[in-house]
Image (cartoon, rainbow, N blue to C red):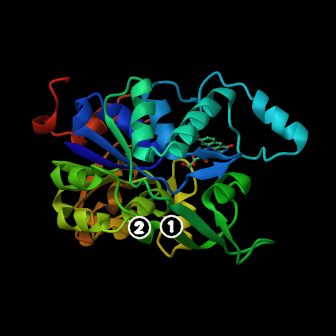
Amino acid sequence: MLAVISGGVGAARLLVGLQRRVVGHELVAIVNVGDDVELHGLHISPDIDTIVYTLAGEVSAERGWGLEGETWQAMDMLGRYGGHDWFSLGDRDLGTHLYRTQRLREGAPLSTVTAEISRAWGLDLTIVPVSNDPIRTMMTVAEGPEAGTEISFQDYFVRLGHQVPVSDVRFAGASASHPAEGVSAALDLAGRIVISPSNPVVSVDPVLAVPGLRDHLVRRRDRVVAVSPIVGGHALKGPAGRLMTEMGYESSAVGIARWYREICGTLIIDTVDAELAPDVEALGVNCIVTDTVMSKPGVLDSLCDLLVPPSSRSTAG
Ligand code: FO1
């Protein structure tokens, strides 16, 4: 079994390669819910949907989220009325939020609804939210007109385009949350736990903020492998590098090693950062140097060959 601590786009891309090597139920994506947002009376789970749409081969290649072939009629209507149209919900994507919201209102836990949605897209890996309880990533703005205020992750990421400095990140609800069914078992039984190349500050940490989960990784540190989301000092997509700097860490593969050193025995870094390998190892973290930019031909497969040792490869091949 392979358990993957998953955020959005980076995790989704890695899971495409992993699902080619690990049979369905042996691959468990434990997904961040801190990005979740309630808008227009709908419960939206961006990281779950990004993973589902990507693995279903339907994600918008241009955006990395939402669906291909989208139309935006509903958003246009919202705009006409002066409604909230800063968070773009395509007409097809809305169907997902309508279904999820209805099922949650019927009392189904998010994990059940997520299983229904991923099954409807023909996926056989296990995609599970880290918790069925509400966890919301909250950002404290450091400068500008909203300085000192706390805003939601999507306000930060989309409405403000993650262009404001942040002085604090909090995971509201995490301390009272419980792991969704199967999450603890997956972390205990997995032959390998992979921390995907997601944002450590706002995608991985909200998962590990669920009480008890960090302890699983500390206990099984020698089976935990992370893929650095920082290549050549920057994140390939999104604000990870900026946020790490704002949290007092260097935006580099070494900063990632420092961020994960208690919970992760091995860090995979990109070849452009090869000279940092000794600094990573000096932190007590084994370092593997290889190509990690998955958009490059062949890299996803070579990276996943590293992550899925032949012993745990499924017959699916
Ligand atoms: N990201 C944006 O930058 N702009 C958007 O309007 C936007 C809408 C959106 C709708 C549904 C969804 O599942 C994701 C969406 N995202 C959008 C991405 C979202 O902000 C994710 O949380 C980030 O990709 C970080 O994981």
Q: Which residue is mark 2?
A: 255
Residue under the point 41% across and 67% down = 255
- Judge left or right: residue 47 versus residue 81: left
Q: Secondary structure at mark 2?
A: helix
Mark 2, Cα crowd under 10 Å, few <14 / some 14-19 / many 20+, is many
Nearest the viewer among 86 and 130 is: 130
User: x and y percent of residue 227 in the render?
Assistant: 34, 51
Q: Residue 37, image x and y in percent? A: 61, 52
Classify the position of the C terminus by image quarter: top left
Horizontal arrangement in the rendering, residue 150 relative to residue 76 (left or right): left
* Location of residue 81 (image quadrant): top right
Judge depth for marks 1 and 2 and give the one in front: 1
Residue 175 point in image, percent of width and height: 42, 71
Task: Give the Cα distance between marks 1 and 2.
Answer: 8 Å
Q: Please, what is the three-letter code of the amino acid marked with disc 1?
A: Met
> Exactly how many numbered labels are in the figure?
2
Residue 118's quadrant in the figure?
A: top left
Residue type indicated by callout 2: Gly
Q: Which label is found at residue 315? A: none
Q: Residue furthest left?
A: 311
Helix, strand or loop at label 1? It is helix
Q: Is mark 1 within 8 Å of ligand 1?
A: no
Asked if the residues shown at circle 1 and circle 2 are in contact, with their CB atoms under 8 angstroms apart, the answer is yes
The answer to whether residue 62 shows anywhere in this view is: no
Residue under label 1: 244
Residue at horizontal 78%, vertical 27%?
73
Name the N-terminal-most of marks 1 and 2: 1
